[in-house]
């Protein structure tokens, strides 16, 4: 009896308060033969502390209500109370898998605010380290997508690749995940011997390794049949949801901030924006595989073209930009990372707004899941590649 | 900076603009009344020479005197980001029309702005808190919400913050009972 009571308290998905909105009231009213199933926030298949309240009819999902906020730390508020230099390490843990991109968006915004000219060598180093991290992030994505579909092997290979890249970046930046490497006006340190020798080793087999990992899944019948035609997001819906990144390109829209709105030295580099038209989980996966190939191409060009020179602009110790507003955006592995900052003339940003792509990508889940089977829910969520650190801020 | 965008915007939106179009770096900025948000967004989205089809961001801003809603849009027709500032929402009762009629994806962004600033978006079907607990009563990103004094450089340094308590709903309505102050040390 006691156990049942405790269970009822812990796992009751119906909120203990009256519905606050029409939508909430509608969702938490059960129809004939429907039931609620609470998934997460602590569940091995959810990526981080995501909680989904599913409304099921038999094994079919009828509706879903994602519940966020379990990892909310108020990063925007913390950034508004720290000075411009400190903001960069505050934004690191947002997308902890690819934290350089969040730093990049922040420094892009600040550099516009302060009219700082970044040395070209620093720009090349940013692109080089960013593309390496994009590959690391995509290999993890591919591995975890397969893991959620029951395939254990790809994640092991994914971690081999990722570990190599992360160790390489540790040689460059001093940290494996939370790099705190980009600075307003440049980067924290120049390329060093250990980084370059590790990178050379890795580049000599990267292309081959990518093809081998891709073959493992592309030709796997179970994987393909469980992702093809599942979780289809069409072009119009993707645009209306504001989805960016690979998830948008999988629906046929060639929107990539690197090309659509060039920053850094991307206009000088030669690479393609892979797009597909199917918009299903398989297309989202294949886009990532193609992007890894493009990133290897970009790294190769960076290594050939990188100029000599300083890696930091000359800046005062205390930054007090003139009052103004600026929006900086860059293309992360999951989509457009944006930062809107307002300066009031003091040494702290007056407003620091973080736009995280995973947040918007996750928003499509209530549109994608209904009609699918319970077993496919996590595969669809995983194919959108959410990172809860960024979503919950 | 796209100079032609300025003339196109002025031609299309002459009745709605507050002040002139401001351009800096690769950003173009316009200011409008909150009431004209739906019309302006509709024109920007549909006009053949504008086609701002991606809502890049929607954010609230508290300037200390007024609340603003800031939209960032992207269009394939220009190399600029467009920023729209819906200016002059009152801090006591900030209300703005929702953008979900055009971009359903604005729903969560508006929920976030509601959660952090208390901006009520009229027309959003699901305006509830998204990050903070449902029984929370403060709006944390407002400028009068001060951090506790462990953030030594916060404007509230030395002052324990004035977040309202997490008590039952009835308690939160009573300001005296709801405010939780740390004991003086």
Image (cartoon, coloured by chain):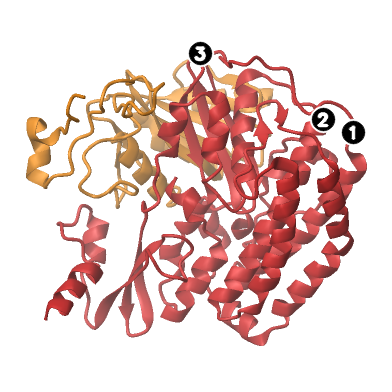
Chain colours: A red, B orange
Q: Residue at x 78, y 45 (%)?
A: A128
Identify whether B77 is placed above or below A18.
above
Residue lying at 60% horizontally and 75% vertically, measured from the top left:
A146
Whether label 3 touches label 1, CB < 8 Å? no
Callout 3 crowding tier (Cα within 10 Å): few <14, some 14–19, many ≥20 = some
Secondary element at image label 2: helix
Q: Which mark is residue B19?
A: none
Q: Chain of mark 3?
A: A
Q: Looking at the picture, tell me which residue is in the foreground, B152 or A302.
A: B152
Which chain hosts label 1?
Answer: A
Mark 1: which secondary structure? loop
Q: CA distance from mark 3 to mark 2?
A: 28 Å
Q: Which mark is residue A120?
A: 2
Q: Are marks 2 and 1 in contact (CB under 8 Å)?
A: yes
Under circle 3, the secondary element is: loop
Q: Quadrant of the N terminus of chain A?
A: bottom left
Specify the quadrant that holds the C terminus of chain A. top left
Residues at marks 2 and 1 on the same chain: yes
Q: Quadrant of residue A188?
A: top right
Give left or right: position of A112 versus A14: right
Residue at image position (39%, 23%) is B152
Give the residue at x 37% y 76%: A61
Q: Which residue is mark 1?
A: A307
**Residue A21 position within the rendered picture, expressed as x and y whole percent measured from the top left:** 23, 53
Which chain is mark 2 on? A
Give the Cα separation between the discs numbered 3 and 1.
35 Å
Give the labeled residue for mark 3: A345
Q: Position of residue B73 (x, y in %)?
A: 54, 38
Same chain for mark 3 and mark 1? The answer is: yes
């Amino acid at each position: 009896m006691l156990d049942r009571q405790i269970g009822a308290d812990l796992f009751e998905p119906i909120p203990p308060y009256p519905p606050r909105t029409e939508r909430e009231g509608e969702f938490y009213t059960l129809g004939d033969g429907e039931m609620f199933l609470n998934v997460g926030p602590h569940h091995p298949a959810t990526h981080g502390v995501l909680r989904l309240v599913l409304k099921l009819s038999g094994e079919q999902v009828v509706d879903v209500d994602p519940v966020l906020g379990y990892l909310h730390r108020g990063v925007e508020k913390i950034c508004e109370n720290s000075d411009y230099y400190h903001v960069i390490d505050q934004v690191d843990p947002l997308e902890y898998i690819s934290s350089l991109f969040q730093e990049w968006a922040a420094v892009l915004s600040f550099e516009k605010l302060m009219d700082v000219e970044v040395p070209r060598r620093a720009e090349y180093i940013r692109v080089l380290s960013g593309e390496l991290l994009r590959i690391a992030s995509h290999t993890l994505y591919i591995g975890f997508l397969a893991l959620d579909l029951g395939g254990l092997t790809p994640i092991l290979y994914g971690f081999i690749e990722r570990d190599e890249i992360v160790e390489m970046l540790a040689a460059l930046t001093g940290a494996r995940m939370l790099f705190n490497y980009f600075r307003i006006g440049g980067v924290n340190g120049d390329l060093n011997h250990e980084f370059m020798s590790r990178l050379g080793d890795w580049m000599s087999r990267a292309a081959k390794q990518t093809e081998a990992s891709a073959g493992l899944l592309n030709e796997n019948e179970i994987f393909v049949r469980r992702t093809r035609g599942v979780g289809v997001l069409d072009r119009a819906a993707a645009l209306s949801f504001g989805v960016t990144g690979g998830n948008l390109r999988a629906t046929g829209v060639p929107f990539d901030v690197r090309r659509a709105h060039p920053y850094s030295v991307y206009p000088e580099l030669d690479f393609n924006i892979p797009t597909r038209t199917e918009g299903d989980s398989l297309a989202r996966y294949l886009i990532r595989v193609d992007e890894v190939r493009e990133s290897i191409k970009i790294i190769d060009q960076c290594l050939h073209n990188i100029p000599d020179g300083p890696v930091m602009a000359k800046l005062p110790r205390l930054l007090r930009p003139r009052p103004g507003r600026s929006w900086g955006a860059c293309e992360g592995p999951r989509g457009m990372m944006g930062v809107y900052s307002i300066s009031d003339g003091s040494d702290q940003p007056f407003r620091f707004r973080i736009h995280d792509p995973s947040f918007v990508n996750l928003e499509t889940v209530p549109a994608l899941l209904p009609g699918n089977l319970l077993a496919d829910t996590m595969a669809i969520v995983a194919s959108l590649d959410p990172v809860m650190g960024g979503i919950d801020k | 900076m796209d100079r032609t965008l300025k003339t196109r915007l002025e031609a299309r939106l002459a009745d709605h603009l507050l002040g002139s179009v401001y351009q800096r770096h690769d950003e173009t900025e316009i200011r409008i009344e909150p009431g004209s948000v739906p019309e302006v967004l509709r024109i920007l989205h549909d006009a053949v020479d504008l086609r701002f089809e991606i809502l890049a961001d929607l954010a609230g801003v508290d300037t200390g005197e007024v609340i603003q809603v800031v939209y960032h849009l992207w269009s394939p027709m220009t190399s600029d980001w467009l920023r729209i500032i819906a200016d002059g929402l009152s801090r006591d009762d900030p209300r703005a029309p929702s953008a979900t009629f055009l971009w359903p994806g604005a729903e969560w962004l508006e929920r976030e702005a509601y959660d952090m600033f208390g901006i009520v978006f009229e027309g959003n079907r699901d305006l509830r808190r998204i990050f903070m607990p449902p029984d929370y009563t403060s709006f944390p990103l407002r400028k009068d919400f001060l951090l506790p004094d462990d953030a030594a450089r916060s404007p509230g340094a030395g002052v324990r913050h004035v977040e309202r308590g997490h008590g039952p709903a009835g308690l939160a309505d009573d300001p005296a009972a709801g405010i939780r102050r740390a004991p003086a040390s």
